[in-house]
Amino acid sequence: MEREQNKKKKKTGLSKKFFIRFWSFFAVFLLCIVLFFVCIELEVFGDMPSFEELENPKSMLASEVYSADGKLLGKYYFENRSNVHYSELSPHLVSALVATEDVRFYEHSGVDMRALGRAVKGMATGDKKGGASTVTQQLVKNLFPRGKLNKAQLMIRKIQEWVTAVKVERSYTKEEIIAMYFNTMDFGSQSFGIKSAARTFFQKEPIDLNMEESALLVGVLNAPTRYSPVQNPDRALQRRNLVLSQMKKYGYITGHVCDSVQQIPIDVSSYTIQDQNAGLAPYFREYLRLELKKWCDNHTKADGTNYNIYKDGLKIYTTIDSRMQRYAEEAVREWLGGELQPTFFEHWKDVKNAPFSNITDAERNTLYERSQRNSDRYRSMKEEGYTEQQIDSAFNAPVRMRVFSWNNLIDTTMSPMDSIKYYYWFLRSGLMAMEPNTGYVKAYVGGPDYRYFKYDQVKYSARQVGSTFKPFVYTMAMQEKGYTPCSEIPKIQPSIELYDGSFWAPANSNKDRIGEMVTLKWALANSDNWISAHLMKEISPQSVIALVRKMGVTSPIDPVPSICLGSADITLCEMVGAFNTYPSQGVYVEPIFVKRIEDKYGNVLENFTPNQTQAMNEETAYTMLRTMQGVVESGTSVRLQYRYNLRNPIAGKTGTTQKQSDGWFIGMTPYLTTGVWTGGEYRSIHFRSITYGQGAHMALPIWALFMQKVYADPTINMPKDDFPKPTSGFDVNFDCSKVNLNLIIEEF
């Protein structure tokens, strides 16, 4: 009996010891876990994101450029990423994501214990049935990348991510987490975030994505290259259909809908990499990029560092009207590609040394060498240490390349030097349009195609302006000498003494009415050289230069009499700004390209207003407008009326330089001033005939096509009003009907 009692006591003692040891071990285990998580929180095992970082996660955001009518023109970025709110997401995107990546997303608090248990069991049994990572954990991993870790570090990092995921769930709503997830993901094709991906693959906003597009983009996330619909369309289709099956499995769509949508083929016909070559106004965006970099160098954030257009998510609101910009690009393409360039090819067909005119072999070879040295290929080879001989050899070796043509891009084999010679054949053109009183630039086309012709003909190309300079001379004559449009001058060849004692007597292609008295209105309409030179003889080159300086022209101008015929080289931007002074009642309004800049939170960093200068009185400006209307009504620009049916009030001036190297037209209405230049890359590339090479044929049709499109768009609603007349005591006679006016179309 006593033995039994001892046994019982002994057994009870063992039970107590086991109980004490078990719970002691369990307590120590729990304490170790607590200490482990405390150490994680104290960053013993490595840095943890702070609350501030959770509230403001760091990611490189693209700066976005918007048109005046709210259209996205393009971006500047290291990573093509722009954030969206949950309300901007298609419901199909959300359903596809939850069904595919985290079906219990709305039930857990950052860590899915059921999925974690399933993953642990799968590791133990080898029967893996999916991962345990939640959408929130994936978000944390995207926001705070792991880097290179060994197995022990990786385990600790995963636990850190669990802790951070729980913090994220406490700091944000489920909707905010989904939006952040879509904003941080890499979709491939240089698209970071759903907004960039939707535009790259489908040219849509995220809210507009349909079911199959949403399923495709969610499927791409698993492996952007492997499931790329462009590189691997079959795999992409399988992956998309798997996402649709998951949506059916978890009740987001019916079986019938799933089966129907799975039959829809993938359509990536709108796929476009979002780089500087894509989208509207590429020349404008490149000019703006350089200006914005200067702006960033002079503006700092709260932390004292300069803004960066490539990663700070700035919003740049421009003056460009996306509709006008599209019409301007279409007008350049239609006239250059559809009419002028084919004529130029035919004009120079089988002509020796084409398309160059009147240059020696040595001069032509110099141009070839200059183009070679200005090429990206030359610069990169030079940086890599190649000798001049090696570079020359490479430039003359045939390679596969894609070259520009107005019909379609051409895949061919030619040497880089042959490609340089090939591109000399293509005429270039620039167009800029601006509002008179605001100075807002509404359209900006720097060339035929930014992908292949990078040089900007609006801001950076100063070319001889020809007869478009003559209105400045007439303006000074009216303002200083009291001339009126109906003042008469004898049409005889003037002779002007130069500083060295020699004399300058200009030529004149207009042979009509020699020796007769002609009005200034007739002379400007027919672009008569002798009358312009006669006026220059009465005033001075210095006074004309002083005037154009007030009108915004900053390019160098030699104070010589020949400037009255347009010998100066001036940019298209300057010329449009100067002409815009006339419909702006004599006030020069500096062309302005940006209205305001905001930071990524929508705070306005700077508003922009144009500089203004009173260049001439209102009466002179209006008188010149009415005089230049005669150019359209009965002069060198009359084809605007009879060929393009533009019969509303238009003032303008054509310009053609020596040997037809440059063709100009600048036209003004009360609400828009637009200038066009057309010519070859070099002055020696041009038409040999005034019929084809005059400004009325090279540049004016682009202006006309552009304005036709603008007037035809009811959403723009461009008025066709007359120019407003000065209100105070203005009395100038514009009816010169007593004079026998002749219709002269061609000019020199």
Image (cartoon, rainbow, N blue to C red):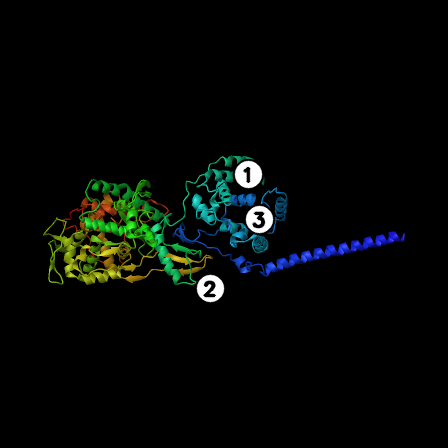
Residue 459, relative to residue 261: is it above or below? below
- Tell me, for residue 134, which label it has, or none: 3
**Image position, residue 63 (x, y; %):** 42, 54
Residue 199, relative to residue 436: is it above or below? above
Q: Nearer the viewer, residue 455 or 690?
A: 455
464 vs 38, left or right, is left
- Label 3 or label 1, whichever lies nearer to me, is 3
32 vs 629, left or right, is right
Q: Nearer the viewer, residue 563 or 264?
A: 264
Q: Nearer the viewer, residue 213 or 231?
A: 231
**Image position, residue 610 (x, y; %):** 34, 60
- Tell me, for residue 726, which label it has, or none: none
Quarter of the image for residue 271 reads top left
Q: Circle 2 sits on which residue?
A: 303
Label 1 or label 2, whichever comes before in sequence order: 1
Q: Circle 1 sits on which residue?
A: 245
**Image position, residue 470 (x, y; %):** 20, 55
Q: Amino acid at mark 1?
A: Ser
Badge 3 element: loop
Give the distance between the C-alpha atoms of the residues marked 3 and 1, in whole angstroms: 20 Å
